[in-house]
Amino acid sequence: METVDTAVRPHTNGNAKPAPDRSDVLTRAHLVDAAAPGMEGLALWLVSRGLEVTGSIALADEDSAAATRLREAGVGVAVGFDARHVREDRTCMVWSGVVTDPHPELDHAQELRLPVLSRAHALASLTAGFGRQLVAVGGSHDTATAAAMLATVLDDGHTGWILNAPARNRAPGQAGERRLVVDLCPDTATHEAAPLGSWNYRPNTAKPYRRPQPAVTLITAAARNAPHFDDTIEALNAVTNLARLSGTVVLPLWDKGAKIVHERLSDRPGPAVVTVGLYESADVWVLPPRWLGGEHLLTLHHQGVRHQFTVPVAGRHHALAACAAIATALAAGEDPQAVAQRVGTFRGVQRSLAVLGTQCGITVVDSRARHPREVAQDVMAARMLTEGNVIVALEPDGIARTSAHASDLGAALGDADYALLLPVSTPLATYEEHDPLDAVERAAVRVLGPGAVHRVRCGPCEAGPEQRLFEMTAEGDLVLVIGTGQAERLGSSLLDRLAQTGAPDTGRP
């Protein structure tokens, strides 16, 4: 599935030649922002295949776990973004599209006449030339848990994967000579609508490129997800196109979009379709997941045989995603006993309803949700983890996304007791629109009430998010931190604060 590039482009060299469509274009690749979600998995997969990989990372990521994994794997990591990081011996440059200013590395790649590939083009190039079984997870959103689980249950020692969000204690990228599991969801990082500027030109790309033709594809969702898909029809078209290129398509019928894709595929000859649903009529019948207090019990009926698994994930939506992944493995012909054994090694997905710890009776949970439906589901799931109040700290993702989904994002907090809204995470230094957080706040107030919604203000005399959360919590509460910018560090920082000072006296602002 092709992603939608919505970021500012570097200046195009008019003399640069388009790259040919060949599988060796990634032989010596340079990756811009190699520690970013999606990019790290690609870098690790390439280097584990024995290819020479260089990459630049942001200064803020210099000491991150992602940077450590890249260095240990053998990626040549450069800190900061500088034209000198792009060597003349590179066969291409890969970038995620998350660029909002003139970029020295991208501009220098144009001067060197290097093929400049988006991440989507790089995935298409490597999967088209993979030559072995390709197992894809695609959809407008909601792919992370399913892709990480699928990589786990197919991990026979000969399976590789490229993931946007890895399972805990696993790398997001790993080579394998038998097959490849790849997460094709476009929603990997904060993309912004491109403002006008002299550099606002698309770089030369390896086009036309061959599209992935997976042996098996799991479709998780098809719905509006701006800025990648401006409406549901656009998402449905992209997902259906991917499905038609697949040998077998697995469709979880609890998603409305997947149901429509099922109807679309029935109008002409095409891929074999395997349905997964909560009704006996589905090809793989899933009983409602049962929460056991620390894990979910999953029961699936496949070809007349009943299978049961336990997975340590909270949230019905994550449990159903795990069911869809297991169903995909069974549909791919994997041995059920091997699947059951590997399921036991799954520990959930990094930053996906992950419990960071408990201090002074206050539990802090991490979430990487971006789409309003993901936010709403994670807030609802947080109720399963506490008998106290649920305080949600939400850092909306991107001006473009937040503007398009503001009302839905605010309404998604309806199952919380209190909400703290952080500034929108964006690489843009300035933007002409009104702050979309205003609309998120109004929608949140409508569902929670004015006394339950608070906002982090910027200024030298304003309290930061850590202090605000500290003042809002009391013993027995759960703090759910949602976001992909400063929110990634906020949960751990709050736990450190509680460990040093103890719980606040008031418990409420």
Image (cartoon, grey):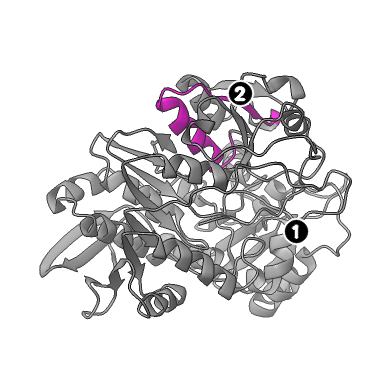
Which class describes the residues within 10 Å of circle 2: few (<14), some (14-19), or many (20+)?
many
How far from the left and from the top, in percent, is residue 392?
60, 60
Left or right of 194? Residue 308 is left
- Is disc 1 placed on a helix, strand or loop? helix
Which residue type does callout 1 highlight? Ile
Task: State the residue in front, 68 or 179.
Answer: 179
Task: State the residue in front, 197 or 509.
Answer: 197
- Above or below: residue 394 compared with residue 148: below
Residue 90, label in figure: 2
Q: Quadrant of residue 432?
A: bottom right
Asked whether residue 114 is drawn in magenta, I would say no
The magenta segment is: 35-59
Q: Tell me which residue sits at (27%, 42%) in the image.
A: 345
Q: Earlier in the sequence, mark 2 or mark 1?
A: 2
How far from the left and from the top, in percent, is residue 134?
34, 47
Q: Quadrant of residue 446?
A: bottom right
For the C terminus, the quadrant is bottom right
Q: Tell me which residue sits at (45%, 64%) in the image.
A: 381
**Marks 1 and 2: in contact by CB < 8 Å?**
no
Q: Tell me which residue sits at (38%, 48%) in the image.
A: 148
